[in-house]
Image: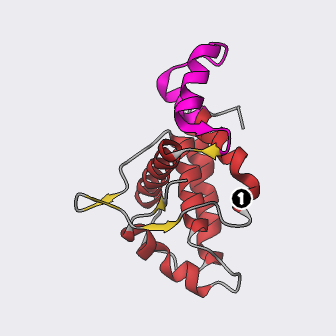
Amino acid sequence: MADFRIRSDCRAWFRRVLSSSELRLLLFDPYYLCFLIGVAAGRKSSPTEGGTEATAFVDAFPRPYDQQQRLLLGLMLAAELRRAGVDVTDRASVNDIVNSLAGVGGLNAAGVATMNEYASGGYDVLITRYEGEAPWNLEEFMPRYLRILDEVISQSELAGQW
């Protein structure tokens, strides 16, 4: 599997949240939260910094996300089908998109790259909607994050589907 990548500005923005929590948070946690906003908004951006690819931080789904791998793939596939304007009853087109992003063992390199793009796009949406400076802790961040995610979902084509 290819590497999961997160931009350094995203790492820096979440640094205080990750370090202040009594929970044992992973860098994959903010990646996941940004990914959710990205797929809900249908927003992708290139996870690059100064023209080079963002730094890889893990090469496989960490626990407990490894148990949710299919769910995350499903969310991404739904976003990609919407993006391509594919009707889910068009089996050939659906299979083409599925096969371009995943194989028997789960995500392929293109699938991980697409997931990275949704996480990067989600971060872009998050920082434009998050009022004020970067959050100081998880307790401050999560209520605001959930409000933003709810707004993004209600404004997207997903409204009524979740």
Image vertical order of residue 161 relative to residue 32, above or below: above
Residue 133 visible within the image: no
Q: Quadrant of the C terminus?
A: top right
Residue at 57 percent across and 42 percent down: it is: 40
- Looking at this view, name the residue that lies furthest to the left: 50
Along the viewing direction, whichever of 82 and 155 lies nearer the viewer: 82
Residue 97: say if magenta. yes
Residue at 69 percent across and 81 percent down: it is: 24
Residue 12 in the image: state x and y as whole percent: 42, 76
Residue 134 in the image: state x and y as whole percent: 45, 74
Image vertical order of residue 146 relative to residue 157, above or below: below
Residue numbers of the magenta segment: 78-105
Element at badge 1? Answer: helix
- Mark 1 residue crowding within 10 angstroms, few (<14) / some (14–19) / many (20+): few
- Looking at this view, name the residue that lies furthest to the right: 67
Residue 121 in the image: state x and y as whole percent: 43, 50
Residue wearing tag 1:
66
Residue 114 vs residue 98: left or right? left
Residue 32: say if magenta. no
The amino acid sitting under disc 1 is: Asp
Q: How many marks?
A: 1
Residue at 59 percent across and 51 percent down: it is: 36
Q: Which color scheme does this rendered protein use?
A: secondary structure
Q: Name the quadrant containing residue 25.
A: bottom right
Magenta-highlighted stretch: main secondary structure? helix
Residue at 45 percent across and 58 percent down: it is: 123
